[in-house]
Image (cartoon, rainbow, N blue to C red):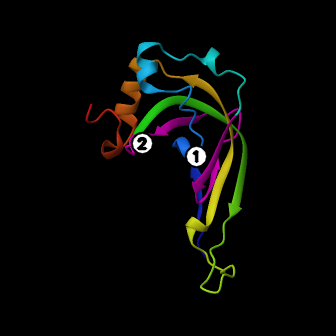
Amino acid sequence: MGSFYEINDTLLINESQGFPSDILNIECHQKNPVTLKDVEDKVFHFKDKPTARAFQLDPIRVFFFERTKNDKWLAWGKVFIQSLTIEHKPRENSHGESAISFIPGDWVTSGTYKIVEIYDPEYQKIYTSHEAPKAWNYFADN
């Protein structure tokens, strides 16, 4: 018997999943770096991460990456996960009824997090360059 449950040490989200692009914007960050004071004590929400996932919970760090509009990975720092919700999103069959299935995409993970570390722009580039897969590395082509 298999399991579709993933264990992640990294929260990789895009804007539609809850990445706070109004605060964390790479162009602005490079000119005027965002600091922890800008986000401390704020609780952010993420949603619709495909599959059932587990993350380490506060006080264990989780690496925080943005999945940019061009599908690249950009490291921003570390977060503490505050809550997790795993939901089944059943598909409908051709008769409009809920179908029983065990497809990983039928499950989504949502939750809340606090940002506990923000990388300065220089370290952000170094960290992303070393840790993001080359094909998805934000700085690989820049």
Give the magenta part as a residue range. 44-72
User: What x and y, as percent, mark residue 106?
Assistant: 61, 68
Q: Quadrant of the C terminus?
A: top left
Label 1 crowd bin: few (<14), some (14–19), many (20+), radius 10 Å: some
| Residue name at image x 59 percent, y 85 percent | 94
| Residue name at image x 67 percent, y 36 percent | 113
Residue 69 - label: 2
| Residue name at image x 61 percent, y 32 percent | 79
User: What x and y, as percent, mark residue 88?
Assistant: 69, 66
Residue 17 - label: 1
Q: Is residue 36 left or right of residue 139?
A: right
Q: Is residue 33 left or right of residue 82?
A: left
Res 37 visible: yes
SS at mark 2? loop
Res 11 visible: no
Q: Is residue 61 magenta?
A: yes
Q: Is residue 131 magenta?
A: no
Amino acid type at mark 1: Gln
